[in-house]
Image (tube, coloured by chain):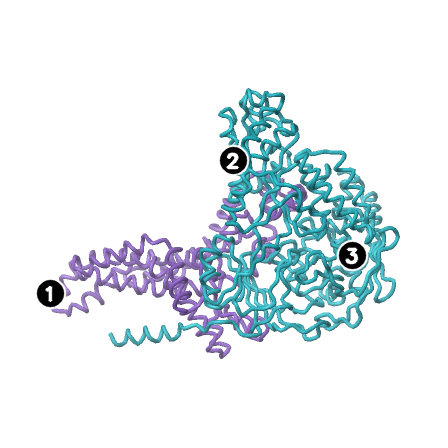
């Protein structure tokens, strides 16, 4: 197991290197003017297009540009993000915890709801409940995330006045800007506890409810359907019949025996999903004013901020590699028969 | 089941939000993100909207009176030496946020810092134009003057001369008297000094924190640098009524400055948030979580904002934004195998390069633009008319110049006269471009197409959206035949519109190859009228240029949306000044 994990970790730099080559290569398809124009934000700056091209070495070839970038990265400098107007690392340090907090707040209920409903649907196969859940899944699946998000903002927040938007209320934002609140993790829910400020934890939790709910509505459907079919598969197998034959309670058969085995495909699906969610959910971030990685990266893509894009792709590569590793470890936990040697 | 019910109730109790921000707090949710809080670097509305409350200039805009100013860090000023020297007498007893006293040294440092750094993507160029005579940073100017192959010795010599000009341009006569020596007469110098880039920075604090040292020793290291990587990018020490507490990503927090020399503001805490989604901003306004929000257009205001309770829409027909939008005609289209002019000949499949040099063509186009439709349909009647390319509230604007409204009969008559009747006989094909995503410019282009094509079936107009970068590139290459574009003020002087729009060397007129010696002569003459007592004469010249432009038609100005401000109804002290980026200063706000 240890060897396996070490080997997997050693692969990560290779993945990152290939990713950076691809992104840098794709950028070469644009003309220097097009890349420079991405720096221009007002009519006034048009006159300076040539200056910008020279300043950022946009006329140089692929190798020169890649070397310039890689040299800086190896020295620990990921560069300056034109999108967030600060060093890339600073932004990642700020926004990664935000994305993480949101992803975890949504991921846990998504999996729980998905697994629970999937199990219910499978054990009540073709009953009214199953049919109903099928409809729920299709509706959830077909709803665009932004529609659900805007509904929640307009009805629950705007209409009823429940929960809130952003990461914290303005009064706390003002207080924290000047105060001596220590950011240990960058996750307000946890930092609130560590600083002995329960109110901050509560406010932060309150603001996670709506974005997490939007994601649960849209994303759980997938997990639920996978869980259902995998569960049905397991329930039809010999060992389930044996378990029933030896007189085990139906609950034990379903929840202890079958479900544990049925979880494998769900884990396969959930791991990368968590990775993608940590990488940011643009629409949710924008609508709930929750500044995470996704919105930053989306803007970088639109405005051709190569520095930001490269750093973001590296980060996503890293997150996905770790997520996949966690999936492999989770297999072992769920199914002790699985061994990596 | 009981357990679940309990959970739902608990969740709901947790969820009930307290509405309305505190009495001494102002929360503004805007659509744009911040670029830089370094006054020299900032050139966008969102950043300047913060900077103008943190830093102060020698004089500043007077609340809601357009074109009037009041002494701020200076108490009086004099123009000497035929407009080549400006002397400002500074206010005494003014403190920076750091506690340092403000003196002439700080003014000298602040203005020289502009001239040393001259970031290409900032407003530094118009200070350079005025004070050193150079619109670019020293290295760029050196390359321009000496060529690419200049020796290091030549470059050094050039840089030394450049530095000397910087040092001579701002001089402290004593601790509270600052003298500016201009490179040449500049009618707009006083107006330029009102822009936030001229905001006075705490020099001791800046130097202590690693900014330029204020001396010749390290000035070369600061030539043309991107100030977004510097300390002043996200830290501030000015003299303004508000202290920057923190800029964290999309939030900027400021608090009232206890040591402020002027009247203490009523609002103690300010939070400016960049919230890019309009629906989210509107719900926050409805809940009272925001005191002010940005709303994109009048259509949204009418459809969604007006029926909200507790919300106020501030607007006034007299308000007009500090910008102008026009349709440009190119008098001599450039570019090999230019796709926008078809065959390049007057054969019904294109236009000759100098197609628009015939006044009849320009007149026919002007009469084909339905200005009433822009005013009434696009802006829902909430707009300002433009008789010339100058904001209507500015001095030098002439409201009595007529506007050519839609008149297809006249358009037809002029098309028949154009090019000795050949236009009418052969027809033409031309492309009108606009930047993709700008719906107003798209509508202007589509309107021209529909109206002109209805006059004669041989007239063909293609409307082509271009990506912003391609649009700018094509305009710069002088290859666009007809295109709508806007211009926003850099500084509050009409010269900032008259010169770019109407002078052959102006940055906009240049792109349409418009050259008229009479215009050039008048504009150049107006630029020599620098004394305060000559200003009426100068403004009269601008009005004359407006009337000449009506006859010559280098471009067709069209209406602009009139501004509005959306706030909670308990916010007071709101006004509109087109030269203040945030429309008003925070210090004038209060809550009832």
Horizontal and vertical percent position of residue B551: 68, 35
Image depth: mark 2 or mark 3 in front: 2
- Above/below status of B228 relative to B574: above
Image mark for residue A245 = 1
Quarter of the image that includes the N terminus of chain B: bottom left
Query: The chain drawn purple is chain what?
Result: A
Q: Nearer the viewer, residue B62 or B97?
A: B62
**What chain does badge 3 belong to?**
B
Q: Residue at x 55, y 74 (%)?
A: B23
Q: Which of marks 3 and 1 is in front?
A: 3
Q: Position of residue A248 (x, y in %)?
A: 14, 69
Q: Which chain carries label 1?
A: A
Q: Does residue A221 appear left or right of residue B108 in this picture?
A: left
Colour chain B is painted in: cyan
Q: Which secondary structure, mark 2?
A: strand
Disc sitting over residue B112 in the figure: 3
Q: Position of residue B104 (x, y in %)?
A: 81, 64
Residue A89 placed where, x, y %? 56, 59
Closer to the observer: label 1 or label 2?
A: 2
> What is the chain identity of the residue bearing mark 2?
B
Residue B585 relative to residue A324: left or right: right
Q: Is residue A7 in sight in this rendering? A: no
In this view, B353 is above or below A186: above
Q: Nearer the viewer, residue A322 or B40?
A: B40
Mark 2 and mark 3 in contact? Answer it, CB < 8 Å. Answer: no
Q: Same chain for marks 3 and 1?
A: no
The residue identified by callout 2 is B464
Question: Is residue A301 placed above or below B17 in the rendered structure?
Answer: above
Q: Are marks 3 and 1 in contact (CB under 8 Å)?
A: no
């Amino acid at each position: 197991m240890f060897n396996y994990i070490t080997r997997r970790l050693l692969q990560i730099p290779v993945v990152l290197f290939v990713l950076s080559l691809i992104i840098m290569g794709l950028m070469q398809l644009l003309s220097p003017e097009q890349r420079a124009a991405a720096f221009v934000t007002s009519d006034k700056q048009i006159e300076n297009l040539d200056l910008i091209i020279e300043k950022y070495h946009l006329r140089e070839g692929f190798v020169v540009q890649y070397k310039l970038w890689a040299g800086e990265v190896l020295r620990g400098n990921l560069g300056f993000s034109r999108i967030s107007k600060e060093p890339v690392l600073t932004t990642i340090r700020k926004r990664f915890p935000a994305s993480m907090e949101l992803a975890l707040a949504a991921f846990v209920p998504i999996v729980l709801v998905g697994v629970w409903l999937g199990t219910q649907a499978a054990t009540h196969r073709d009953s009214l409940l199953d049919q109903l859940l099928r409809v729920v899944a299709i509706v959830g699946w077909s709803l665009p995330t932004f529609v659900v998000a805007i509904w929640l903002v307009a009805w629950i927040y705007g209409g009823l006045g429940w929960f809130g938007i952003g990461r914290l209320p303005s009064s706390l934002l003002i207080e924290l800007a000047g105060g001596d609140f220590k950011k240990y993790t960058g996750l307000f829910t946890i930092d609130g506890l560590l600083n002995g400020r329960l109110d901050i934890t509560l406010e932060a939790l309150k603001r996670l409810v709506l974005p997490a709910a939007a994601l649960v509505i849209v994303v759980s459907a997938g997990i639920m359907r996978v869980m259902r079919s995998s569960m049905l598969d397991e329930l039809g197998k010999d060992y389930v019949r044996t378990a029933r034959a030896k007189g085990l309670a139906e609950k034990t058969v379903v929840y202890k025996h079958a479900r544990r085995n049925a979880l494998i495909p769900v884990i396969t699906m959930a791991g990368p999903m968590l990775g993608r969610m940590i990488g940011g959910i643009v629409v949710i971030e924008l609508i709930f004013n929750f500044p995470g990685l996704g919105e930053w990266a989306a803007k970088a893509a639109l405005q051709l901020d190569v520095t930001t894009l490269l750093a973001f792709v590296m980060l996503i590569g890293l997150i996905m590699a770790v997520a996949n590793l966690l999936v492999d470890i989770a297999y072992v936990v769920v199914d002790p028969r699985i061994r990596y040697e | 089941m009981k357990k679940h019910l309990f959970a739902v109730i608990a969740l709901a109790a947790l969820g009930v939000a307290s509405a309305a921000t505190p009495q001494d707090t102002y929360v503004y949710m805007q659509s744009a993100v911040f670029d830089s809080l370094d006054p020299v670097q900032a050139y966008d509305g969102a950043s300047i909207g913060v900077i103008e409350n943190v830093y102060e200039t020698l004089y500043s805009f007077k609340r809601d009176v357009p074109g009037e100013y009041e002494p701020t860090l200076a108490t009086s000023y004099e123009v000497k030496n035929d407009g080549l020297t400006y002397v400002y007498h500074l206010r005494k007893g003014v403190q920076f946020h750091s506690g340092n006293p403000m003196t002439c040294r700080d003014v000298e440092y602040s203005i020289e810092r502009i001239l040393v750094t001259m970031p290409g993507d900032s407003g530094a160029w118009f200070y350079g134009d005025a004070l050193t005579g150079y619109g670019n940073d020293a290295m760029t100017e050196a390359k321009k003057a000496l060529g690419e192959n200049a020796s290091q010795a030549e470059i050094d010599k050039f840089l030394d001369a450049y530095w000397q000009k910087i040092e001579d341009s701002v001089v402290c006569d004593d601790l509270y008297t600052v003298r500016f020596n201009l490179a040449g007469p500049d009618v707009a110098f006083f107006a330029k000094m009102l822009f936030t880039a001229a905001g006075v920075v705490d020099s001791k604090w800046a130097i202590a924190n690693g900014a330029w040292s204020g001396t010749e020793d390290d000035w070369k290291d600061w030539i043309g640098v991107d100030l977004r990587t510097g300390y002043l990018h996200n830290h501030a020490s000015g003299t303004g009524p508000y202290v920057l507490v923190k800029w964290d990503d999309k939030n900027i927090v400021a608090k009232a400055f206890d040591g402020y020399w002027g009247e203490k503001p009523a609002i103690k805490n300010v939070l400016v948030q960049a919230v890019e989604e309009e629906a989210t901003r509107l719900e926050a306004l409805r809940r009272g979580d925001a005191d002010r929000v940005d709303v994109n257009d009048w259509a949204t205001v009418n459809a969604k904002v007006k029926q909200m309770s507790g919300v106020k829409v501030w607007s006034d027909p007299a308000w007009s934004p500090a910008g102008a939008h026009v349709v440009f005609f190119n008098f001599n289209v450039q570019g090999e195998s230019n796709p926008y002019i078809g065959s390049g000949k007057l054969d019904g499949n294109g236009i000759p390069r100098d197609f628009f040099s015939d006044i009849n063509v320009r007149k026919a186009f002007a009469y084909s633009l339905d200005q009433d439709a822009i005013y009434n349909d696009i802006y829902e009647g909430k707009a300002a008319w433009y008789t010339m390319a100058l904001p209507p509230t500015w001095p030098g604007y002439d409201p009595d110049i007529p506007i050519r409204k839609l008149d297809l009969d006249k358009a037809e008559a002029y098309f028949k006269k154009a090019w000795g009747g050949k236009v009418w006989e052969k027809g033409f094909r031309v492309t009108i471009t606009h930047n993709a995503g700008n719906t107003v410019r798209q509508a202007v282009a589509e309107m021209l197409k529909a109206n002109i094509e209805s006059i004669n079936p041989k007239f063909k107009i293609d409307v082509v959206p271009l990506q912003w970068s391609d649009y700018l590139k094509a305009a710069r290459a002088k290859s666009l035949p007809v295109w709508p574009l806007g211009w926003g003020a850099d500084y509050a002087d009409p010269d900032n519109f008259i010169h770019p729009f109407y002078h052959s060397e102006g940055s906009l007129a240049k792109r349409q190859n418009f050259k008229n010696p009479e215009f050039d002569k008048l504009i150049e003459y107006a630029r020599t009228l620098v004394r305060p007592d000559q200003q009426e004469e100068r403004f009269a010249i601008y009005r004359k240029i407006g009337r000449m432009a009506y006859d010559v038609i280098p471009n067709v100005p069209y209406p602009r949306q009139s501004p509005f401000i959306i706030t909670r109804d308990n916010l007071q002290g709101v006004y509109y000044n087109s030269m203040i980026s945030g429309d008003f200063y925070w210090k004038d706000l209060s809550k009832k």
